[in-house]
Image (cartoon, rainbow, N blue to C red):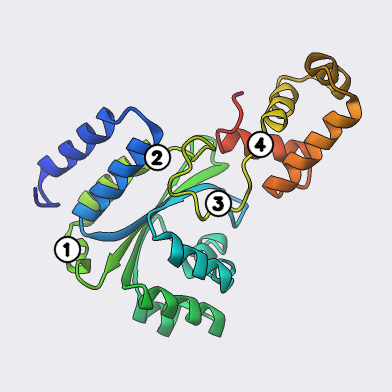
Amino acid sequence: MTPMNSKNFLIDTIERLSAAKEIDETWHEIVALSQEAGAKYVSIGQFSTAGYWPTWSRVSIEEELVEEFLAKGYQDVDPVLLARSRGKLPSHSHVTIPQMIGHVCTSERERECAKFDMTCGVTDFISFRYSGPSGQMEQLITLFGGVSNARELRSTGDATLATFAGILAAHATPPTPESPDGSAWNHYDFLSVRERDVLTYLACGLNNDQIAFRLGISEVTVRMHTRGARKKMGASTREQALALALARGLISP
């Protein structure tokens, strides 16, 4: 394996991700590359700068661990997500589980969450935030160091690791109903075909009457699909539903 600190590793990373043609193939390469770099797991998500939950995310953590994590409600007190939402997560952050338990976590529930991560074999969290061009969205990528391989991540220079993480984040794409791999942490349900159609027409500036005519359905049904899309995405308004659907790649502008 090419050493992480080698320039050839970054070149190989770009070439392998550029060669991937399908969404899931790209995600599988991201997972494989992160593991070769010394990470136990990798998580990539896009966030609204004003929101807590990701508009989309992909994680490589085993499904059964994710289910247990969610069943215990730890998603609400995840230390990394909380730090990001509180504006206390810098653009490059490296924290260990002992540091989290002793200094970062401010409540017993947060400490429980960090201890759960430790039982899953995680020792380190190395996170990078990247702002979008509009300043309204940002990406967060976290490399999870493990008991047996965290030393390799720790020994990598910050500049090299930041470049590597940036390459992975740049190639990551939202999961879709056809390519859902790694989407276990998404806090929304996928839209139905009709819900996508309605939101797409709304994004084009059509009103309910015009959409009903185009789709051959009633205006009441249009409103029903709009409400369904809002509920699935946790949006409080039609405008927010449109913004989230666009950000998640569920509809095209």
Residue assigned mark 1: 152
Q: 10 Å neighbourhood of mark 4: few (<14), some, or many (≥20)?
A: some
Q: Quarter holding the C terminus?
A: top right
Residue 56 visible here: yes
Q: Position of residue 202 (x, y in %)?
A: 75, 25
Q: 10 Å neighbourhood of mark 3: few (<14), some, or many (≥20)?
A: some
Residue assigned mark 4: 243
Of badges 1 and 3, the one in the foreground is 3
Q: 10 Å neighbourhood of mark 1: few (<14), some, or many (≥20)?
A: some
Whichever of callouts 2 and 1 sits on the residue coming sooner in the sequence is 1
Whichever of callouts 4 and 1 sits on the residue coming sooner in the sequence is 1
- Residue contact at pointers 3 and 2, CB within 8 angstroms: no
**Label at residue 186:** 3
Residue assigned mark 2: 172
Q: 10 Å neighbourhood of mark 2: few (<14), some, or many (≥20)?
A: many
Whichever of callouts 4 and 3 sits on the residue coming sooner in the sequence is 3
Marks 2 and 1, Cα distance to the nearest angstrom? 23 Å
Whichever of callouts 2 and 4 sits on the residue coming sooner in the sequence is 2
Residue at x-position 75% and y-position 36%: 239
Of badges 3 and 2, the one in the foreground is 3
For residue 52, side relative to residue 34 (left or right): right
Whichever of callouts 1 and 3 sits on the residue coming sooner in the sequence is 1
The amino acid type found where label 4 is placed reads Ala
Mark 1 element type: helix
